[in-house]
Image (cartoon, coloured by chain):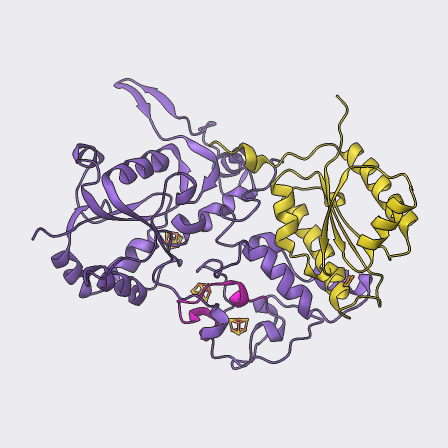
Chain colours: A yellow, B purple
């Protein structure tokens, strides 16, 4: 059976979630691999949510927010801009390929960009392969 | 009335938690007066077989320190659980894996290979390597098997209460003992005893300002101001992600908090919270500059989870 990546997407309500919606309404084809969770801002995505996603078996996690300067809470996405690279370093230390975590800016009008990001990431994760966290197999 | 029965046990532990109990000084005599100590390998000559011979649930309280890192630790955890009404995870190692839990950053093979073969100070020893079974003229010797992954106590048995700290502070230990002896109703199962429910920063006398950081230092790289918050000065301090209870001992001694009291309430993961806290105070808006600043934070995993790798969300590194 071919491997279908499971990707968790945390999408900011104000931009990227609407962007995803637009992609749907405009019938732009995109891979069905991203499970979307809507958040009020990319800055609301607690790093623990991302670690938990991996613990529960996500093959990848993508955080999408408003373009820099467009955050509805002003500084929220700048926080994200610092958090995600920091978190990539942390998961790399945990032995998780940092390419499994992505940060993308997608506005409400960028349905095509949403589809592009999703398709590209799905293909990349497909190449990297499934992620099964070894903590789920701990016996001894 | 018969005295309540008390047991103390150490699993994968450094002995510091035992010292912390002895640091009760003369109050240790009050403990001995108030309880019937039925098992305490570090101080009294009881054997495992004595415990096995006890009736189930005949021990009132077991203070269990140390992590679970081999078959003996795990067997003893189950035995103490069977024999005790209340089991308390005592100290950071039992509470969240503690310092031995750092072994989860590597593998059992890598550790044994380093210790018995590769480390520069290992004298060539004709290939001696730990085995669980060894044949000797007198018969076969069996020693415990080391586990691949270190676990906190509640990852192998049901735990009633937690007393955090590496080690727990003697005044806090005494507070818990006094409370138990007072006969007041015990807190709900799962409660953390001998600690506060805020963060270490709340107990810290250092002055905090609005943080904006472009540079981080390891403690030896800077002469820090004794009155200002260490984190404000760019020294990684885990105060914001550690439970109160120790009285901010380390920052008071000019050393950053390493998080031994564990995560504060409603914080599932010290490292995740620390990533969040630091990201909020880094004063940079360009990816390149951000990367440069992050380069100064050496080994976030080993630093942010110094005592809590086994109890963290990811629990161990992927096998390399
Ligand atoms: S919690 Fe600290 S003092 Fe206690 S056994 Fe573990 S390392 Fe030693
Ligand atoms: S970060 Fe450290 S030094 Fe600063 S207030 Fe908190 S505990 Fe004190
Ligand atoms: S300051 Fe931090 S590391 Fe030091 S004893 Fe307190 S909780 Fe533990
Ligand atoms: S509101 Fe969209 S990233 Fe903050």
Front-lying residue, B251 or A1: A1
Q: Which residues are magenta?
A: B236-254
Question: What residue lies at 57% left-to-right and 44% top-to-bottom?
Answer: B314
Question: What residue lies at 45% left-to-right and 74% top-to-bottom?
Answer: B203
Rendered image quadrant of residue B11: top left
Find out whether residue B124 is within the magenta segment.
Answer: no
Front-lying residue, B262 or B14: B262
Q: Quadrant of the N terminus of chain A?
A: top right
Query: How far across and down, in percent of the image, does residue B112 sit?
Result: 49, 35
Find out whether residue B245 is within the magenta segment.
Answer: yes
Residue B120 seen in render: no
Residue B98 seen in render: yes
Q: How many marks?
A: 0
Query: How far across and down, in percent of the image, does residue B111 sit?
Result: 51, 38
* Horizontal side, residue B146 vs residue A24: left or right: left
Question: What residue lies at 49% left-to-right and 48% top-to-bottom?
Answer: B311
* Horizontal side, residue B21 vs residue A39: left or right: left
Q: Vertically, is B159 above or below B164?
A: above
Q: Vertically, is B186 above or below B235?
A: above
Query: How far across and down, in percent of the image, does residue B284 sit?
Result: 77, 69
- What secondary structure is the stretch in magenta mostly built from? loop
* Farthest left residue in view: B1
Question: What residue lies at 60% left-to-right and 56% top-to-bottom?
Answer: B272
* Farthest front residue in view: A25
* Horizontal side, residue B67 vs residue B266: left or right: left
Query: How far across and down, in percent of the image, does residue B110 sit?
Result: 55, 36
């Amino acid at each position: 059976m071919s491997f279908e990546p499971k990707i968790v997407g945390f999408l900011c309500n104000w931009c990227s979630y609407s962007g995803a919606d637009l992609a749907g309404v405009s019938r732009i084809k995109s891979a069905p691999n991203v499970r979307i969770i809507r958040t009020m801002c990319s800055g609301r995505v607690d790093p623990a949510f991302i670690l938990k996603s991996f613990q529960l078996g996500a093959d990848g996690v993508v955080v999408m927010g408003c373009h820099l300067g467009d955050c509805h809470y002003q500084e929220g996405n700048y926080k994200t801009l610092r958090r995600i690279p920091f978190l990539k370093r942390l998961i790399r230390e945990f032995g998780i390929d940092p390419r499994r975590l992505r940060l993308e800016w997608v506005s409400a009008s960028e349905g095509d960009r949403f589809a592009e990001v999703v398709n590209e990431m799905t293909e990349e994760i497909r190449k990297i392969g499934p992620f099964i966290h070894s903590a789920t197999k701990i016996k001894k | 009335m018969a005295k309540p029965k008390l047991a103390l046990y150490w699993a994968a532990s450094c002995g510091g938690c035992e010292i912390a109990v002895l640091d009760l000084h003369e109050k240790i005599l009050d403990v001995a007066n108030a309880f019937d100590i039925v098992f305490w390998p570090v101080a009294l000559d009881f054997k495992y077989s004595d415990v096995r011979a006890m009736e189930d649930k005949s021990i009132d309280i077991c203070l269990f320190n140390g992590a679970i890192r081999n078959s003996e630790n795990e067997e003893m955890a189950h035995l103490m659980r069977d024999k005790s009404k209340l089991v308390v995870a005592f100290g950071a190692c039992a509470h969240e894996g503690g310092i031995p839990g750092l072994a989860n950053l590597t593998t059992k093979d890598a550790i044994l290979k380093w210790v018995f073969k590769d480390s520069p100070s290992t004298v060539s020893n004709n290939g001696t390597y730990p085995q669980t079974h060894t044949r000797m003229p007198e018969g076969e010797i069996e020693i415990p098997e080391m586990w691949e992954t270190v676990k906190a106590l509640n990852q192998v048995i049901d735990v009633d209460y937690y007393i955090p700290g590496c080690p727990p502070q003697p005044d806090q230990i005494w507070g818990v003992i006094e409370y138990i002896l007072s006969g007041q109703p015990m807190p709900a199962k799962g409660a953390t005893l001998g600690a506060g429910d805020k963060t270490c920063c709340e107990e810290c006398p250092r002055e905090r300002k609005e943080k904006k950081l472009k540079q981080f230092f390891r403690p030896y790289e800077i002469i820090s101001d004794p009155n200002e918050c260490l984190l404000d000065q760019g020294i990684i301090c885990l105060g914001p992600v550690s439970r109160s209870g120790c009285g901010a001992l380390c920052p008071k001694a000019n050393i950053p908090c390493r998080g031994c009291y564990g995560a504060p309430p409603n914080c599932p993961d010290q490292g995740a919270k620390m990533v969040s806290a630091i990201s909020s105070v880094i004063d940079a808006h360009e990816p390149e500059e951000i990367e440069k600043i992050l380069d100064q934070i050496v080994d976030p995993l080993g630093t942010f989870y110094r005592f809590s790798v086994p109890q963290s969300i990811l629990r161990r590194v992927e096998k390399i």
